[in-house]
Image (cartoon, rainbow, N blue to C red):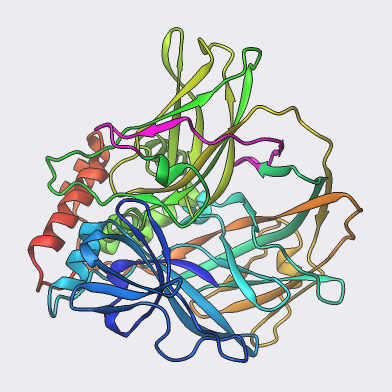
Amino acid sequence: MQQRLAVSQVKNPQAETIVGLTTVKAEDVEFDLVPSTGGTFQGRTGGVYENSVVRGSVKGAEYRIPIDQVQRLWVMRRGISTGRTVALVGVLGGAAVAIAVAVAVANRPPPQPSTGGCPFVYSWDGQQFVFDAELYGGAVARGLQREDYSELPHLLQAHNGTYRVLVNDELAETDYTDRLELWTVDHPAGSSVGIDDSGNLYSLGAPQAPLSARDENGADLLPWLASADRRIWETPPASTPGGQLRHEIHLTFSKPAEAATAKLLVHAGTGEWGLRMFNALFELYGQDLENKLASLDSDPANAQALKLWSATEDLYSLKVWVEERSGWQIRGVIPGGGMGSRVVPLDVSQVKGDQVHIRLQPPAGFWAINSAAIDYSPEQNLEVNRIAPQSARTGEGRNVLPELQATDGRYFKALQGDSAAIGFTAPSVRPGMGRTVFLHSNGYYRPDVRAHGPADTTTLSRIFGTSDGLARFAAERYAAWRLAPFAAQ
């Protein structure tokens, strides 16, 4: 199971088995691992953290690197799922400064882990359940309930003619899933398929990596963004509230002379500190939090206002600017939530020349971007099967199939620690065709936020009443965490 974790959640890095790391220079390092006969890992294989250094063996040679040169760590753990042991591969996300602070200050308590997220989905790959997706991120109230379309990139393998997935509630929240539906999309071999945030499917014939990718200071981001791998661009919040609250990413792609439309394929999601700050925002409501969430449920205008604020601030959706003859224009939006791939259709008919220039302006600490590519290929015929679940049982054996077969207000309600095994009939694949699988879901979740005392109306007014208010608040919290090493967060 692959899962991205915050560095601050790793209290004892010296006790972890580190299987790989990404350096601040975008180098992807995989340590040598020695599997046991059963295929699991035993003993202290992989890398080891000692005295602010990560060391291990890479292709038989000794490798050492100071922790302040590491952008991200990958660790191997084991967990139990449906009666068998499976590997838990965690990504310890965050910038180098966050890692250095987290492991170098003795006895320093880390910030509290995120208190809400969304349901986690694991796919059966023929041997084990592998982490694949997070559902309906950002839908933190019934009034924000939404459709979600998540690609399951680890190829599902049928078991007795059935595709199997697990839907787990692993965070401090209550999940309300109204519907689950599997989409199998068969396409010509050699091509692939993407999906946008509205559930529209696109054939992808020849996605092209950027010609260049740079930040606001001219730093080369191409090693981070050129491919969907373990190199993920993710920065901390501003170091001070008066610091740089946004970054600016400039992407350049080639453009055929006749192209009027393009398919921008982005692999991205909400950053760890950003998720933490959404929960901190809830805490500011104190004893009024339930009333606030109830107003989102009962008043569509309140829910719409929250969505508009989030979109304006680029918090849970990130605007895509395209340079045209008349200047920079907004031509698309990248959705937030769990790390995943989305197609953003773009109008490039007004672009001058043989290149497309794209600008992104993510608030510092709120976004993690893995890759970006562009595709101009014509649409191909796709064979789509939309499959309702044929079985759905919780870990206690309760049948929840009726709750998941239609969007009808009957929810599969899951508390932290609950899990459901879902089965779907697997259609046969025609010879010469490839297959991509998506999970269509509908639902919302309610974070378990421990809010006490009166609402902090002063801070709330500042967040909602000023430009980049939440990004500034995130910088304040981040600065307080760094400067008060022994204060509980």
Query: Where is residue 323 drawn, in percent x and y?
Result: 44, 17
User: Which residue is rendered at x = 14% and y = 40% of the image?
Assistant: 243
Q: Does the magenta stretch include residue 203?
A: yes
- Give the camera-side residue of 28 and 346: 28
Q: Residue 215, how many percent across, how many down?
A: 31, 35
In terms of secondary structure, what is the magenta stretch mainly?
Answer: loop
Q: Which residue is drawn at 19% across and 38% down?
A: 244
Q: Which residue lies furthest to the top in this view?
A: 326
- Quadrant in the picture for residue 284: bottom left
Q: What is the quadrant of the N terminus in the image?
A: bottom right
**Relative vertical location of residue 223 with respect to residue 442 in this rendering, above or below:** above
| Viewport quadrant of the C terminus | bottom left
- Span shown in magenta: 195-220
Is residue 361 a member of the stretch shown in magenta? no
Front residue of this view, candidates 59 and 338? 59
Q: Residue 66's quadrant in the figure?
A: bottom left
Out of 323 and 441, give the one closest to the viewer: 323
Residue 75: image location, x then y, percent: 41, 74
Q: In this view, does 185 lie above or below 172?
A: above
